[in-house]
Each structure stands twice: as structure tokens, then as C-alpha cells.
Image (cartoon, rainbow, N blue to C red):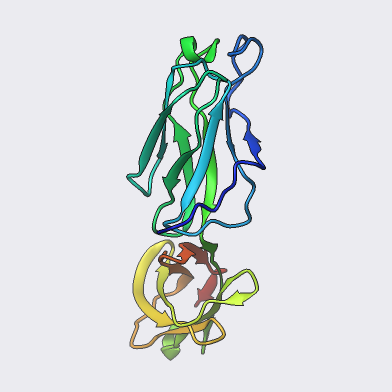
Amino acid sequence: MKKSLLAISAVAVLSLGTVAPAMAYPAGQAPTLSLSSVSRLTPGDNVSVVVARVKSSCSVSLEWVSGSGATTSATVGSRGRTPVMTIATPSTAGTYTLRTSQISSTCSGGSAVTLSRAITVGKLASVTAKLRTTSGFVSKNPTVSITGTVKSGSVAVASKTVSVSLRLAGNEVKTVTAPTNGSGVFTANFTGTSYTAGSYTAVVSFVADSTYAAKNSTTAVLKLR
């Protein structure tokens, strides 16, 4: 059974993304969404949340804007706050938005509001890549290659596959895949490709999985004459 990563004893208060209501419940206080501060959440584990400064007996629901069908709800208690609500994080790493249902003006004591929070789930991958060629002249049938590295912070992302799309003026010429080695390094060669003169770039795409979030990177322009 997955454990909750968050303890509500140490909470970081989420400020509203919009202007707070002038007369919130209790008077002068806007509703808040609270969760403990963490450096990282693991895909599929639980987030524990409390919504406070809402009128007693009102119902509040939580959901992810995208990435998971998980929802939960609770009724606000006599102290103006929900009991601890737990909701599972999406199963794929990435940055997601957790939001409440709309809290009506009656329940907020002011304007109707929706609370939301962007949350990073799992490890974030970074991609660096460079486009090279054996010749700058299309008449010499150059071999174009892309070499790069996939890391999560300072840690190499090994034994993963990236997709590399070679593009001319934004239009795809050819797409190949390449694996990362133990150092997170990959090399993609566009052999057997006929080129025309122009400005080329390559887009490297790392697909999200249960550990790492997706990441794209575009190389600098390479001109062939």
C-alpha cells in the first residue's frame, strides 16, 4: 500500500492565482489549500491536502486538471477546514495542476473561487543536443548526426530511448530513435538521407515514463549549402 508522502503538520499555504475575495470566510480571510513542503513526489503515491477558511458543512472536491482520473472530496468541519484529503498522484512523471472544485460565494464568504497548485511529480529530465555534419555542402552527401545527453539533475538517465527529428525550415526530413548509454549519452545518425540546401535543426524528444518527465530540446541551426 502506497504511503502518503506529506504530513500536514508542516504546511505551505497556497495563495490564490487570482485576486482574493474582499469578504472571505471568516471575514477578511480567503480560502486556502495547504500541503507540506516536499522536494519530490513519486508517481502513484498520495498527496495529503487540507482546504481551510471555508464555511462549515460545505463540500470541497479535489482533482488533477490532467494526467489522472483521481478525485476526492470532503465536508468542511466546524473549524472551517476539511479533514485531511488524500489523492493519488498521476502514474507518469511530470508537472501537473491540482485544483479544487469551485468554492461558492456562500461557502467562501466572498466571491466564488477555485484553488489550484502546480505540483512536480517524479524526476525531471533535461536534454542537451548538438547537430553536426561531415560536410557543409549537400553536393558531398554529408552525414548529419545529433549527439546529446539526458540527465536528471546531475544523474545520467541511462538505457532510455530518445526520438530525434531532423527538420528543414521547420518541416520534418527524417526521424530516428537512439538509446542512451550508461552516461546518458545518445547519438543519432541520419544516414541514407538526401539533403537540400537550407537551415536544419533537430528536435530531441524524451518520452515520459513512471520515473522521468518528458522533455524536448531543439538544437542550434545548421546550414547546408
Point 64% across, 41% down: residue: 9
Quarter-wise, where is residue 65 in the image?
top left
Name the residue nearer the viewer: 184 or 57. Answer: 57
Left or right: residue 91 versus residue 156 is: left
Q: Is residue 104 above or below residue 83?
A: above
Q: Residue at x 33, y 88 (%)?
A: 192
Q: Residue at 54% of width from left, 43% of height from top?
A: 118
In x, y percent, where is residue 223? 53, 73
Out of 12 and 126, give the one closest to the viewer. Answer: 12
Whether residue 114 is visible: yes
Residue 140 vs residue 110: left or right? left
Q: Position of residue 211 (x, y in %)?
A: 46, 66
Residue 54 pos. (x, y %): 53, 19
Foreground pick, 10 / 136: 10
Position of residue 210 relative to residue 82, above or below, is below
Task: Return the residue nearer the eye: 96 or 89.
Answer: 89
Q: How many numbered circles are shown?
A: 0
Name the side, left or right, on which 60 lies relative to 220: left
Task: Establish if 95 lies above or below 223.
Answer: above
Residue sticking out furthest to the front: 78
- Which quadrant is home to the N terminus? bottom left
Q: Is residue 130 visible?
A: no
The x, y position of residue 153, in whole percent, is 63, 69
Residue at 50% x, 87% y: name it: 181
Classify 125 as above or below 135.
Answer: above
